[in-house]
Amino acid sequence: MQRYFSDEQTLQLKQTITLPADLYKHAITVMRMREGSEFELVTQDQQVNIMTLTAVTKKSAQAQVTEIFTHQVELPVEVTIACGLPKSDKKTDLIVEKGTELGATHFIFFTSDYSQGKWDEKKQIKKLERLNKKALSAAEQSHRVVVPDVKYVKKLADLDVSAYQARVVAYEESAKAGEVSNLVQVLSHLQGKQTPPQQMIALFGPEGGISPQEISTLEANDFTLCGLGPRIMRAETAPLAFLATTMYALELAQQTPKD
Amino acid sequence: MQRYFSDEQTLQLKQTITLPADLYKHAITVMRMREGSEFELVTQDQQVNIMTLTAVTKKSAQAQVTEIFTHQVELPVEVTIACGLPKSDKKTDLIVEKGTELGATHFIFFTSDYSQGKWDEKKQIKKLERLNKKALSAAEQSHRVVVPDVKYVKKLADLDVSAYQARVVAYEESAKAGEVSNLVQVLSHLQGKQTPPQQMIALFGPEGGISPQEISTLEANDFTLCGLGPRIMRAETAPLAFLATTMYALELAQQTPKD
């Protein structure tokens, strides 16, 4: 069923709403839904509301809540993916789209020492608008109950990491030196600590990697240097591999067989 | 250092070779290497040979083996990714490129029940040539010692699975039903069985998923149905998430801390 996100804080069973303009446009004009058609509407309280269209005119439409359920689809940790700005929009797009499918909740891009671009203020607004739209549509498609947000900070020093209980940085030199167990240890410390969800930040360099100065700053801020296996991954691949390993460690391997 | 793959079976220390035309073109014309420049050449025996250019003319170049080493960068299992043909070239490209970075050794595309396209014979040759080139260049970039191959079979029934000791299929219905432990169990059975590497096939549907008939066929062929977490992934994302979880289970979590 088509899923949309709503600005409404919460909805009650049988409550009727008028579709906001963007929802009307997609559901009625693009998807050609009619009276009796159903869709899912996720409210800010992360409830999934099954909505049935009760009235559709050429200008507006009304829908009623016919069922409400809770769907546990979020990673048990709240993951922030922080990336040194890669070369191309194609890569930022991929990180946000696939990273949303894989469960990240926040994305922060920053101009790192080896980044070949930066976003001035005008660019920032345009780029972030585009990326936040990508995150919304990926969240709808992957049936998340949270829409990840995408931000930009000028440089690593502007990144406030005080809220994160777990901090890792993917470091190619660690991988080359054969380091394999740091990520496993960080993730195993998070196992079982699910209420409230722990905050985790995972930081990745752009194409040229992370500078020694940046590594020093990160180490001083209690980041754990982690290898991600012996193969060299492109800048946009490493965050996705990290998210999949987090899913494996905290969702799949965490649960015991049901029978 | 730039890495290339060679058709040579093996090379000896101090042996001198004449660069094949395509290597000459990339190393000398594109990368502007000169006498004394070094590059890595991986031979069929998976050895990494450090080559030093000893003579460069406008038409040919010679290089000598100055060092030979073995680099363990391959996954401890040999993974075949089999995918129902997705809608667009963009998706097959992404599966092959990122799948190579993440350690897959073989890719097989097939026209599944819900695939919206098929490759006739003429198309096949062109598409496979393009995808195999993508695999080669991703293998060079991610410093693999094996170049993955990409094949096509017309339908699921044409896929010979007799050689695979481990067989899994990512099944959205399993994920929806909350199945989380099958993949963990399959991967843990593979732990430690590394000589010779076990053969594993992981099968994925196209956009519409896998048909009930196909699931029956796969179950009859001893495939284990696996969920890949509660979020719905696009067709091209699931194989990459699977490969990252395999890396985590068999490479990272497998090793004990070194100190």
Image (spheres, coloured by chain):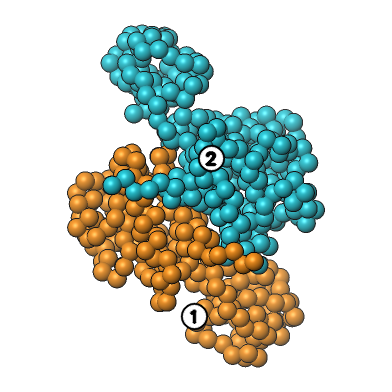
Chain colours: A orange, B cyan
Q: Residue type at mark 2: give it.
A: Lys
Describe the element under mark 2 as helix, strand or loop: loop
> Height in image: B212 above or below A106?
above
User: In terms of image quadrants, where is residue A208?
Assistant: top left
> Height in image: A215 above or below B28?
below
Of discs 1 and 2, which sits in the foreground? 2
Q: Are marks 1 and 2 on the same chain?
A: no
> Height in image: B255 above or below A151?
above
User: In terms of image quadrants, where is residue B25?
Assistant: top left
Residue in view at x 29 percent, y 55 percent: A224
Give left or right: position of B125 versus B247: right
**Which chain's residue wears label 1?**
A
Q: Quadrant of the N terminus of chain A?
A: bottom right
Residue in view at x 34 percent, y 62 percent: A201
> Height in image: B90 above or below B141?
below
Give left or right: position of A120 versus A194: left
Mark 1 lies on residue: A44
Marks 1 and 2, how far apart in space? 48 Å
Q: Position of residue B64 (x, y in %)?
A: 35, 12
Give left or right: position of A57 versus A101: right
Mark 2 lies on residue: B193
Question: Which labelled disc corresponds to residue B138?
Answer: none
Give left or right: position of A28 versus A73: right
Q: Position of residue B239 (x, y in %)?
A: 57, 49
Q: Residue type at mark 1: give it.
A: Gln
Answer yes or no: do the residues labelled 1 and 2 have beta carbons within 8 Å? no
Q: Position of residue A211 (x, y in %)?
A: 24, 46
User: In terms of image quadrants, where is residue B41?
Assistant: top left
Q: Quadrant of the C terminus of chain A?
A: bottom right
